[in-house]
Image (tube, rainbow, N blue to C red):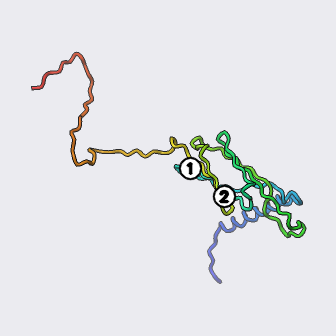
């Protein structure tokens, strides 16, 4: 008999996969017929930020460029689109229809650091990429701190500043 290593998380993952398929099957059963092919969907999105911009990447394969709309209003970025069901094939010939069709709408509240006049969007290989540049005044600035005399070959005399309090009743004595 072979010795196998027991992995407790394998059973948990198996249970999670069964539960996910159960809920997916239930939601599909609710939308039988035409509703299945025209159901709204929500494309997944990745949002990340660096010191220069905020970037959104949406998975929208099969959607034509003219079916996408991006709008910016009151610090809210709205992305709308529609994936149309091709009626070339008769529906009764399909064995399964798992892809989602219909329209979607996603709205993102953006930080005030984003420059709403500087937005770029590109669409490649089913990924819609929206880049929102940050305002120049909100970008972090690196300030160089210099220590000691400057690196020049000539040394120039530097004035010294002495801090103290001035008391008008104390008279200074001339230096001898």
Extreme-top residue of the structure: 169
Name the residue tied to disc 2. Answer: 123
Q: Secondary structure at mark 1?
A: strand
Q: Is 38 on the left-hand or right-hand side of 110? A: right
Q: Nearer the viewer, mark 2 or mark 1?
A: 2
Extreme-bottom residue of the structure: 1
Q: What residue is shown at x 67% (from left), y 55% (from top)?
A: 45
**Up-down: is 73 above or below 167?**
below
| Image coords of residue 14 (percent x, y) | 71, 67
- Distance in Å between CA atoms under marks 2 and 1: 18 Å
Q: Secondary structure at mark 2?
A: strand
Q: Residues within 10 Å of mark 1 (few under 14, many from 20)?
A: some
Quadrant of residue 159 in the image?
Answer: top left
Q: Is 70 on the left-hand or right-hand side of 87? A: left
Quadrant of residue 102 in the image?
Answer: bottom right
Name the residue tied to disc 1. Answer: 53
| Image coords of residue 2 (percent x, y) | 64, 82
| Image coords of residue 40 (percent x, y) | 80, 54
Q: Earlier in the sequence, mark 2 or mark 1?
A: 1
Q: What residue is shown at x 58% (from left), y 43% (from top)?
A: 115
Give the position of the N terminus as an image quadrant.
bottom right
Q: Is 32 on the left-hand or right-hand side of 83? A: right
């Amino acid at each position: 008999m072979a010795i196998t290593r027991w992995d407790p998380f394998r059973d948990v993952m198996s249970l999670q996969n069964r539960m996910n398929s159960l809920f997916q099957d239930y939601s599909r059963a609710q939308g039988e017929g035409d509703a299945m092919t025209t159901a709204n969907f929500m494309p997944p999105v990745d949002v990340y930020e660096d010191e220069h911009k905020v970037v959104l990447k949406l998975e929208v394969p099969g959607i034509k460029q003219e079916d996408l709309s991006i709008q910016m209003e009151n610090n809210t970025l709205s992305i709308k689109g529609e994936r149309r069901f091709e009626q070339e094939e008769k529906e009764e010939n399909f064995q399964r229809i798992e892809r989602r069709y219909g329209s979607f709408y996603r709205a993102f509240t953006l930080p005030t650091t984003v420059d709403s006049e500087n937005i770029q969007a590109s669409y490649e290989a089913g990924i819609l990429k929206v880049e929102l540049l940050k305002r120049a005044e909100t970008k972090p600035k690196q300030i160089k701190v210099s220590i000691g005399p400057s690196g020049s070959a000539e040394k120039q005399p530097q004035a010294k500043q002495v801090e103290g309090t001035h008391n008008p009743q104390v008279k200074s004595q001339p230096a001898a």
